[in-house]
Amino acid sequence: MATKQLSLRASAASRWIACPASARLSAQMPYVEGGEAAKIGTAIHALAETCFQLDSDPMKSIGTVVEGITMTEENCEFALEHLKAIWAIEDELGEGSVTVEKFLPYQDSNKVKVGGTTDVIGISKEKRKLIIADLKTGRGYVDADNDQLRLYGLAALEAEQLYKYIDTVELWIIQPHHGETRKHSMTTQELVDWEHYVLIPAIENALNPLFQPVPSDSACQYCNARTICPAQANIAEIVATAPPVEMLTESQISVLLTKFDMVEGYIKAVRDHALKRMESGSVIDGWQLQPKRALRSWTDESAAKKGLLALGLDEDQVTKTELITPAAAEKLLTKDQKPNLEALTSRISSGLTLARDKGLTQ
């Protein structure tokens, strides 16, 4: 029986490089459709690509439907920021140097397929430079020096046979939620070294059925195989059998706090999986489906107001006016107006909480 080809997507490279076994485990899981945020991101990418090809203004698409998503002003602004980055790359490398939304295969064999669709590729043999750019529409900060873009860079060098023509590879992240475009520059040799010492071993380990999962924050956070991962179950067992809180040493607390992040994700994954199984008809001993707590709401606000006034309540008792939040106000303002909010707002912490010490290596 032929072995099924393992797919290693560039967009998930940080996960399967950190934990190669996660790729094999994830391949056993059913397909999960992306959430609303992912669909919005896809629509923004599609709008930017269309506007680049047609040389049109994405801001004229406010209110239109793209990929099933009604485009808001912010969506169109994100597409425009992406376009500005594409134009900047073209200005730097020359007319005709840029290609958008291109699939780049890094490796494709009977055993494994590695690659992905890059947002922007800029190539200049004359300037001996390759630029790989990616638009991120989410709020989670993404560093320009990341595994996904490095893999795209290698795939581009291989696909176009550019190794002897390119000295510098520049990685760009366009992420409007976090300000200006971030850039990371490296030599072609540095990228090839990463390929040999990091990427190739990760691919080999992903194909090795004896290679065990390596749980970590970066590997486990978005892994859809947490419910079948033996390492996750082992971590949960360690937490469940930990000594009473009062008996824990500082060293034990440090270890447990690190594992809690991964266990919480595992617990949520199990609960979500159980809900789906029971919704499809499975029976799980000791558990049942029940409606969520019902929240009362007015069937008809206008009729409710009249009814309350008829009951003798005053106008100011049944209606309430309050100032909108800074976040809500920001959505109503134009990009040029938004900086003015800083003078009208303040940030007050509600207290202290635990956080990772970023100065320490995990």
Image (tube, rainbow, N blue to C red):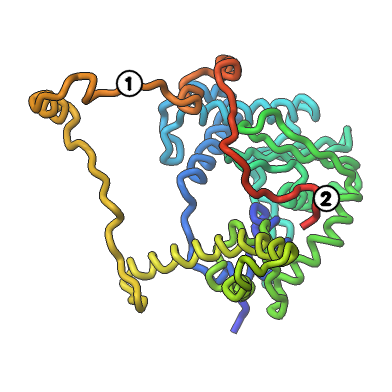
Image quarter of residue 197: bottom right
Say whether residue 194 is left or right of residue 31: right
Q: Residue at x 33, y 76 (%)?
A: 283
Q: Nearer the viewer, residue 143 or 76?
A: 143
Q: Is residue 198 above or below residue 286?
A: above
Residue denoted by label 1: 321
Residue denoted by label 2: 161
Image quarter of residue 85: top right
Q: Residue at x 88, y 33 (%)?
A: 127
Q: Is residue 98 above or below residue 230?
A: above
Q: Residues within 10 Å of mark 1 (few under 14, many from 20)?
A: few
Say whether residue 96 is left or right of residue 343: right
The amino acid at mark 2 is Gln
Image quarter of residue 225: bottom right
The amino acid at mark 1 is Thr
Instruction: Give the percent coordinates (x, y) of residue 158.
Output: 80, 53
Q: Secondary structure at mark 2?
A: loop
Instruction: Give the percent coordinates (x, y) of residue 358.
Output: 76, 48
Q: Residue at x 71, y 31 (%)?
A: 181
Instruction: Give the percent coordinates (x, y) of residue 326.
Output: 50, 24
Q: Of the residues under marks 1 and 2, which one precedes in the sequence?
A: 2
